[in-house]
Amino acid sequence: MRFQTPLLFITALSTFFAISNLLYPVKSHASDTSESRDPVEMISVPAGIFLMGSGNNEGRADEKPQKTIYLDAYSIDAFEVTNKRYLHFIHKTGRKEPPNPYSTKKLSEEVNVDLKPVVQVTWYDAVDYCRWAGKRLPTEAEWEKAARGINGEAFPWGNQPPGPLKVNYEKNWDGIHTLWPVGSHPETDSPFGVHDMAGNVREWVSDWYSADYYQTSPIRNPMGPGLGILKVIKGGSWHSFKGDIRPASRGKGGFALKTDGIGFRCAKTEK
Amino acid sequence: MRSLIDKSTTHLFCFTVAILLSLATVGYSYAAPETPKDMVLINPGGFIRGIDKSTQGKKETVQASASYKPFNDESPASMIYLSAYYIDKYEVSNAQYTEFIKATDHPAPAYWDHHLLNQANHPVTGVNWYDANAYCHWANKRLPTEAEWEKAARGPAGNIYPWGNDLDFKKANFGGGKSGNKKTTVPVDSYPEGKSY
């Protein structure tokens, strides 16, 4: 009899927790779910310094001066979010599909576009997707470091100018052939192994745009100005010229901007 | 070579972005320089700017359409004198803007990779004021003033629309084309009938 009381107590207690877990799932369960929501390879970028911006002889006024910036460790999606991944999010969350740039069909009825990066998404669409996936948009600094490595090279693959065969830029619209599937040109990967950081689609990042931010930014973990009108869009797209596909180049647009050449990828702080 | 008094030079297509500083000092001299390519000369003189609210009562004298209703900041109407100037016959196209960004490494505008908007002969879109200003300076021109734009669009006599006083879907791309088939920009020279006085 004496023996049974704690046993009963433990049984009652564990039953209570089991039920309350069902009713109010605790955090650890939620993050398991959001990780499985977006099963894409992520690349770890270790904590450390890198060269951000452009020196005297290259680039535009708003990307100068070149500074040594320190970032904490983070991870970033190896690939841009594809139509397939984005439509999965749309259907799971009961949202409206983005406009289909290829034809008058719904995007979900379009064939052979699963592995192409999603476009026609606003900054808020991108933020919502990453949040749903348990991640966030990268900062401009995180994006730039992931794209060019730590030594300030002009392009993800080094300092050589791009060629039309390996980089999708300076192209005109060609229907379903315009955008290339993500990860289809590994020879242009960044030093960290991140794919497609120049051309194809440009990408939303979390920062507001300000033309003087590269002059005034903190040297540790810059997050962008506190306020702004335009968001930064990095990397250039299929119709861009060479100057706009350099990782240091700073594209910009209002948060409701949607085009056939703006997509995104997500990032995450590493614990 | 067009003469200053040639009436055809005053027949211009309305929507314009850039103009050239002009004959202000030359006045009515007949030694007029040749009109630059795809620009039109606007003769010196007065024009009616704005719309009087008080004329609303007698607007049956013009063929008023439903959209003929001045906004608060458009009145009073007044007679404004402008010196002569040139203004582009067409809005700046994506093809022209491409030349500019190739020559200057100016960053591409917002809708550069929107395939319905970025076609070569459509007007460039997604440019901010600084982009437009930079383009005009690169082209050795400048942005028109509001008065210059309005005079070039309405002519001297205060037309409501560039071509007259009646709204017409054959003369401009607006309201989704009404037939529903135009939901985006069209080439800059699509509406010859929509040219201004």
Image: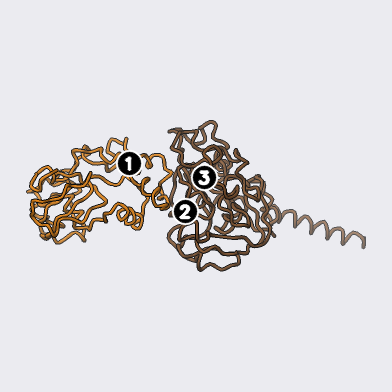
Chain colours: A brown, B orange
Other-residue count near label 3 (Cα within 10 Å), few / some / many at <14 / 14–19 / ≥20: many
Residue corresponding to mark 1 = B122
| Chain name for mark 2 | A
List x then y, in percent, for residue B60: 8, 48
Residue corresponding to mark 3 = A199
N-term mark: 3 or 2: 3
Q: Are marks 3 and 2 on the same chain?
A: yes
Q: Nearer the viewer, residue A208 or A166?
A: A166
Q: Secondary structure at mark 2?
A: strand
List x then y, in percent, for residue A169: 49, 42
Q: Secondary structure at mark 3?
A: loop
The answer to whether residue B175 is visible is yes
Q: Are marks 1 and 2 on the same chain?
A: no
The answer for how far apart the CA atoms under marks 1 and 2 are is 22 Å
Q: Nearer the viewer, residue B74 or B110?
A: B110
Question: Taking A228 as reference, is B135 above or below it?
Answer: above
Say which quarter of the image contains residue B196: top left
The answer to whether residue B52 is visible is no
Q: Secondary structure at mark 1?
A: loop
Residue corresponding to mark 2 = A251
